[in-house]
Image (cartoon, grey):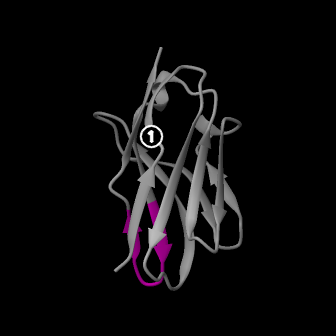
Amino acid sequence: QVQLVESGGGLVQAGGSLRLSCAASGSIFGLTAMGWYRQAPEKQRELVAQITSGGSTNFADSVKGRFTISREKVKNTVYLQMSSLKPEDTAVYYCYALTVPRDYWGRGTQVTVSS
């Protein structure tokens, strides 16, 4: 059974930084990508950042230049480094892993950015 466990969320002032971690436990086969979505109150879930098994990355336009994504292959862990945080980054951040034939999701971690 694969589980994704997120950590690193919390409360930070605007302009500050946080690093989210997502560790996958269990055996993951056919992993193609890992990444993060977020969902703010009364808004749709949106893709924040993704990194593929080949190392390619993509980001939401709203976070480009402020967030970076990285991974430790051996640990099946992905990190989201968030800098220059804004109040509009406030959301629950969900980690995911795309594999063949299914996806896995974490339970989410709250990020709150105060103005």
Q: In this view, does 80 lie above or below 112?
A: below
Please state if 56 lies on the left or on the right of 31 as rendered: right
At a point 57% along the width and 60% down the height, the residue shown is 78
Give the magenta range.
96-105
For the image, the number of numbered tags is 1
Q: Name the residue under label 1.
A: 9
Q: In this view, does 105 lie above or below 65?
A: below
At a point 71% along the width and 66% down the height, the residue shown is 55
Q: In which quarter of the image is residue 62?
A: top right
Residue type for callout 1: Gly
Q: Where is residue 14 in the image (x, y as percent from the top left)?
A: 54, 19
At a point 36% along the width and 50% down the height, the residue shown is 108
**SS class, disc 1:** loop
Q: In this view, does 26 lie above or below 11?
A: below
Q: Is the magenta stretch mostly helix, strand or loop?
A: strand
Q: Where is residue 47 in the image (x, y as percent from the top left)?
A: 49, 50
Please state if 68 lies on the left or on the right of 38 as rendered: right
Does the magenta-highlighted stretch encompass residue 88?
A: no
Q: Position of residue 68 (x, y in %)?
A: 67, 46
Q: Position of residue 30 (x, y in %)?
A: 53, 84
Q: Which of 3 and 34 is in front in this view?
A: 3
Does the magenta-highlighted stretch encompass residue 102?
A: yes
Q: Which residue is situated farthest in the top direction here?
A: 115
Q: Residues within 10 Å of mark 1 (few under 14, many from 20)?
A: some
Q: Tell me the quarter of the image containing the N terminus.
A: bottom left
At a point 48% along the width and 44% down the height, the residue shown is 8
